[in-house]
């Protein structure tokens, strides 16, 4: 079983991640996909609660997860926040130092045993 951490972000991120979770749920119900979904905050959503772009607890979850799905972060609401704590800092921390990000199109076929076309394979993003 794969452990997937959903960091939905803020702005449109939570809406997009809700739909991505619906797709994962569908694969679970119709294709036997077994995953453990966990959610936490990143970006502006994390700043509003923790006054930082990603909490230590969320970062620990990201490090332990098999897959991290990351939504959009940032917006005018946080323009006056210190640069080190701005929502975009959460992206930098995750991408540059600790985790890989993948596109859903690459991950799900691999989990359920399907074949992945080479053009879709090129969508894999490793940071």
Image: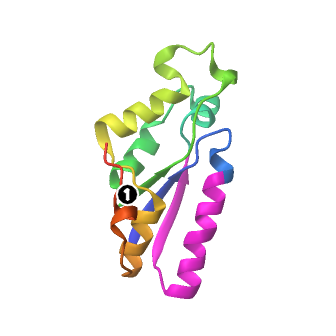
Quadrant of the rendered image containing residue 21: bottom right
Measuring 38% from the left and 46% from the top, which residue is drawn there? 60
Which span of residues is magenta-colored?
A: 16-40
Is 109 situated above or below 75?
below
Q: Position of residue 120 (x, y in %)?
A: 40, 63
Query: Along the horizontal axis of the image, is 65 left or right of 27?
Result: left
> What secondary structure characterizes most of the magenta part?
helix
Secondary structure beneath label 1:
loop
Q: Position of residue 80 (x, y in %)?
A: 63, 12
Quadrant of the rendered image containing residue 113: bottom left
Q: Which residue is mark 1?
A: 65
Is 6 situated above or below 32?
above
Q: Position of residue 114 (x, y in %)?
A: 39, 80
Q: As rendered, which of 113 and 92 lies closer to the eye?
A: 113
Residue 79 in magenta?
Answer: no
- The colour mode here is rainbow
Q: As rendered, which of 55 and 13 lies closer to the eye?
A: 13
Q: Is residue 1 visible?
A: no
Q: Is residue 13 visible?
A: yes
Q: Quadrant of the C terminus?
A: top left
Is 79 situated above or below 69?
above
Q: Position of residue 123 (x, y in %)?
A: 39, 55
Quadrant of the rendered image containing residue 2: bottom left
Measuring 70% from the left and 23% from the top, which residue is drawn there? 77
Measuring 53% from the left and 39% from the top, which residue is drawn there? 42
Q: Quadrant of the N terminus?
A: bottom left
Measuring 38% from the left and 39% from the top, which residue is drawn there? 94
């Amino acid at each position: 079983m794969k452990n997937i951490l959903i960091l939905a972000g803020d702005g449109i991120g939570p809406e997009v991640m809700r739909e991505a979770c619906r797709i994962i749920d569908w694969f679970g119900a119709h294709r036997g996909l077994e995953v453990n979904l966990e959610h936490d905050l990143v970006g502006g959503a994390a700043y509003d609660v923790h006054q930082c772009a990603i909490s230590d607890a969320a970062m620990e979850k990201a490090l332990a997860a098999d897959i991290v799905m990351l939504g959009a972060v940032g917006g005018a609401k946080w323009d006056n926040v210190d640069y080190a704590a701005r929502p975009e800092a959460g992206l930098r921390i995750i991408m540059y130092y600790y985790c890989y990000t993948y596109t859903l199109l690459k991950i799900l076929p691999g989990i359920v045993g399907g074949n992945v076309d080479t053009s879709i394979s090129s969508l894999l993003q490793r940071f």
